[in-house]
């Protein structure tokens, strides 16, 4: 599995290389600003990330913890359900809905599940035809009707049939565009209601498909879908075809929704679970030197570690307060790195909310006697 995300970030890495052609062990905040903007991280988020970095020279570990923090809030929670698991797929036309439905279907089928498709985008004849073609190709049954027919009826029939025949998974396509936004909102709400009527608790997951090549401009559209129907997770398609991979951070941050998978190509196999660690580390590999290379750069680090005090500095009361604040910030960075924690926010002057980087658990740490520690 490892490597698909890295490969699909090739174009984003090429864009980064234009502003950062040489890998280094540290970057200045100004350099990082250019790099993040070039990768299409939204301006406000770039500022937020950089404002939380206190060092002028930024190392890989520091940037890694800040980037992971932007993806930290969005965790997908599995729901309890009685089979079949009903999944509703929403998103604008062209985002990659049909292709992604096929990819998901193949994935579930390969896991040994019995899958059924519902061709719920009855607004477009091409959508019904395309999904039917995929269903044939993957040898997966599909429930469909003619163009212009009621899409909720298709959803109902698909779920009903899956229940009767003991299927594990139903994936239902929906329209990406109708005559007006209100029509679309009403239609999606109706499908939602009918799914629940056909099978209590359904849909168990509503997934929004976002076209990765749109970068940050997809955010407004995604927010609109979330307001219309309530989205549980996102799939970002065409990551392989875009230089705007950094928008993944902005999308996750702006919507506060988990990214379930990313599309890494046009074939049914090209769907990869989104691993935030692999994603962040692939981008950082393009910027920072490897461990062995670090040896050569050790001298540079030593220079950094030297106290940056000039003889002309007078130790006024104000200087001391500034030094204490700097020490507190430095110790915080050290503690976060040592404990593999992600900074979330300041709770009070000496208490900070953090997150264990491998889990959805938040906890508080406190600054006392010149040291950061967990609050007992
Ligand atoms: P829909 O209108 O939302 O159903 O979109 P389609 O599924 O028809 O996809 C639109 C186009 O995007 C098609 O040419 C797909 O092959 C292409 N596409 C979808 N997902 C990906 C992906 O992850 N990578 C690439 N390179 N192309 C994709």
Image: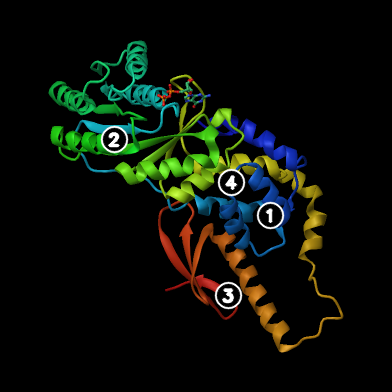
Residue under pointer 4: 41
Q: Label for residue 183?
A: 2
- Binning the other alpha carbons within 10 Å of mark 1 as few (below 14), some (14 to 19) or many (20 upward) gives some
Which mark, by number, is residue 371?
A: 3
Is residue 77 in view?
no
Q: Earlier in the sequence, mark 4 or mark 3?
A: 4
Crowding at mark 3 (Cα within 10 Å: few <14, some 14-19, many 20+): few
Mark with earlier residue (1, 4): 4
Q: Is residue 55 left or right of residue 253?
A: right
Upstream in sequence: badge 2 or badge 1: 1
User: How far apart are the two marked residues, 3 and 1, measured between alpha carbons?
Assistant: 22 Å
Q: Nearer the viewer, mark 3 or mark 1?
A: 1
Q: CA distance from mark 2 to mark 4?
A: 33 Å
State the image quarter where residue 124 is shown. Answer: top left
Q: Secondary structure at mark 1?
A: strand
Q: Quadrant of residue 122?
A: top left
Mark 2 and 4 residues: CB-CB less than 8 Å, in contact?
no
Q: Which mark is residue 323?
A: none
Tag in front: 2 or 1: 2
* Badge 4 density bin: few <14, some 14–19, many ≥20, Cα 10 Å: many
In this rendering, is residue 40 above or below 373?
above
Q: Earlier in the sequence, mark 3 or mark 1?
A: 1
Say what secondary structure mark 3 lies in.
strand
Q: Is residue 198 above or below residue 259?
A: above
> SS of the residue at dot 4?
loop
Mark 2 or mark 4, which has the lower sequence index?
4
Q: How is the image coloured?
A: rainbow
Residue at the image point whose x is 52% and y is 40% from the top:
217
């Amino acid at each position: 599995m490892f490597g698909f995300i890295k490969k699909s970030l090739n174009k984003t890495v090429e864009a980064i290389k234009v502003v950062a052609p040489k890998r280094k062990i540290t970057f200045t905040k100004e350099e990082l600003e250019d790099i993040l903007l070039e990768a299409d991280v939204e301006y406000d988020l770039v500022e937020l990330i950089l404002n939380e970095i206190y060092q002028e020279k930024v190392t890989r570990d520091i940037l890694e913890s800040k980037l992971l923090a932007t993806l930290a809030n969005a965790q997908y929670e599995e729901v309890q359900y009685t089979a079949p698991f009903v999944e509703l797929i929403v998103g604008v036309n062209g985002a990659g809905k049909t292709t992604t439905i096929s990819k998901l279907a193949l994935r579930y089928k390969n896991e040994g599940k019995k899958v059924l498709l519902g061709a719920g985008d009855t607004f477009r004849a091409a959508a019904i035809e395309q999904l039917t073609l995929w269903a044939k190709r993957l040898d997966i049954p599909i429930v469909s009707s003619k163009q212009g027919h009621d899409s909720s009826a298709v959803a109902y029939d698909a779920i009903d049939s899956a229940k009767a025949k003991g299927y594990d998974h139903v994936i239902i396509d929906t329209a990406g565009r109708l005559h007006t936004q209100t029509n679309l909102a009403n239609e999606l709400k109706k499908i939602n209601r009918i799914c629940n009527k056909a099978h209590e608790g359904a849909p168990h997951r509503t997934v929004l498909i976002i076209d990765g090549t749109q970068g940050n401009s997809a955010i407004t559209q995604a927010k609109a879908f979330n307001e219309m129907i309530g989205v549980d997770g996102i799939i970002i398609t065409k990551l392989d075809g875009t230089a705007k991979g950094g928008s993944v951070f902005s999308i996750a941050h702006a919507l506060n929704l988990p990214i379930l998978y990313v599309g890494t190509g046009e074939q049914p196999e090209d769907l990869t679970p989104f691993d935030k660690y692999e994603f962040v580390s692939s981008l950082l590999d393009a910027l920072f030197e490897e461990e062995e290379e670090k040896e050569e750069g050790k001298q540079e680090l030593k220079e950094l570690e030297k106290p940056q005090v000039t003889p002309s500095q007078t130790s006024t009361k104000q200087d001391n307060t500034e030094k204490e604040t700097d020490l507190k910030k430095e110790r915080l960075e050290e503690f976060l790195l040592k404990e593999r924690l992600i900074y979330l926010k300041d709770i009070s002057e000496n208490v900070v909310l953090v997150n264990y980087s491998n889990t959805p658990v938040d906890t508080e740490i406190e600054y006392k006697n010149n040291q950061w520690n967990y609050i007992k």
